């Protein structure tokens, strides 16, 4: 979720309006320049095993991402008002508020950010440069707009970008993104209702996770991504350009996935 702070009274509605505005602007730009936006973002079905791997990898990447973020927090002082804003957006005191927070922070952010960053930005860059390069650039922009959460956001953005690059379907990174955001929302709700002792201290306070946990989760993540790469080998060999999907040949000046 992209977090901004206006300096005034922050509300969840402010975040939802920003999310909707970002989505509408990107939709209008794509519709004007390339026609059907949904064709550009590649809303395709994916095999259940591929989706399962992406969801499990989403959980596995959390300890390393939080730990890297903790290293940044230990060296850079984060204004307390930024943290308060995040809590204000995700905190829920009742089930209706929890549903609203999930719709805005988890579902809304996942839809809008995947459409903008993977569906529009990375998709456009992949027609002009190698796939890995498009993922790196998109991840950098994605992380920069998450401001003080840049390290963790870059890791997450690169992970989501690779899912899109390999599967050629925005559905897979969307589900992974939704999984990560949902963990944040439901964890905060559980903490508010049952207390911080319900979860490990490193996760609640965004501290360094135990080294063994980082190592194990990192290994699990690598194994899951290796399996996903194997499952998506045929998709990754296809040319990236949407025009090539229809004709079978990439248009002039477009790099195919074989050039990676």
Image: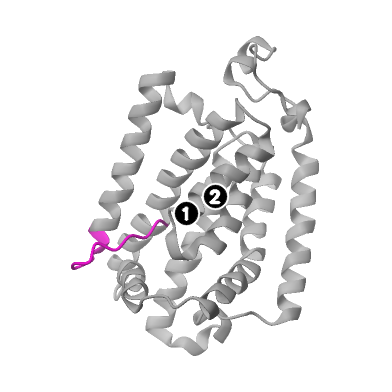
Residue drawn at the location 77% of the way across and 43% of the way down: 229
Does 133 appear above or below 204?
above
Residue drawn at the location 72% of the way across and 77% of the way down: 213
Q: Position of residue 28 (x, y in %)?
A: 33, 28
Q: Quadrant location of the N terminus? A: bottom left
Q: Position of residue 51 (x, y in %)?
A: 64, 47
In the image, is residue 81 part of the stretch drawn in magenta? no
Q: Position of residue 18 (x, y in %)?
A: 29, 50
Does 105 appear above or below 232?
below
Q: Quadrant location of the C terminus? A: top right
Start and end of the magenta stretch? Answer: 1-13
- Left/right placement of residue 154 relative to residue 115 reads right
Residue denoted by label 2: 140
CB atoms of marks 1 and 2 within 8 Å = yes
Residue denoted by label 1: 144
Element class at badge 1: helix
- Left/right placement of residue 17 relative to residue 107 reads left
Asked whether the viewer can see residue 42, the reply is no
Asked whether the viewer can see residue 219, the reply is yes
Q: Position of residue 22 (x, y in %)?
A: 34, 43
């Amino acid at each position: 979720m992209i977090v901004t702070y206006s300096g005034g009274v922050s509300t969840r509605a402010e975040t939802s309006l920003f999310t909707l505005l970002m989505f509408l602007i990107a939709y209008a730009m794509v519709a004007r320049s390339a026609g059907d936006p949904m064709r550009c973002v590649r809303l395709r079905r994916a095999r259940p095993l591929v989706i399962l791997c992406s969801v499990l990898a989403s959980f596995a990447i959390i300890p390393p991402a939080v730990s890297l973020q903790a290293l940044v927090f230990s060296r850079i002082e984060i204004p307390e008002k930024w943290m308060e804003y995040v809590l204000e957006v995700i905190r829920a005191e009742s089930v209706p508020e929890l549903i609203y927070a999930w719709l805005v922070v988890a579902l809304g952010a996942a839809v809008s950010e995947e459409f903008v960053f993977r569906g529009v930005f990375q998709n456009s860059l992949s027609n002009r440069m190698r796939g890995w390069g498009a993922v790196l650039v998109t991840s950098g922009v994605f992380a920069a707009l998450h401001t003080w959460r840049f390290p963790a956001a870059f890791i997450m953005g690169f992970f989501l970008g690779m899912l899109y690059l390999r599967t050629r379907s925005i559905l897979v990174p969307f589900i992974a993104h939704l999984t990560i955001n949902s963990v944040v929302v439901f964890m905060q709700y559980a903490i508010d209702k049952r207390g911080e002792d319900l979860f490990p201290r490193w996760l609640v306070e965004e501290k360094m996770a135990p080294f063994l946990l980082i190592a194990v989760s990192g290994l699990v993540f690598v194994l899951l991504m290796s399996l996903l790469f194997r499952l998506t080998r045929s998709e990754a060999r296809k040319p990236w350009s949407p025009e090539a999907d229809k004709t079978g040949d990439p248009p002039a000046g477009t790099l195919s996935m074989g050039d990676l």
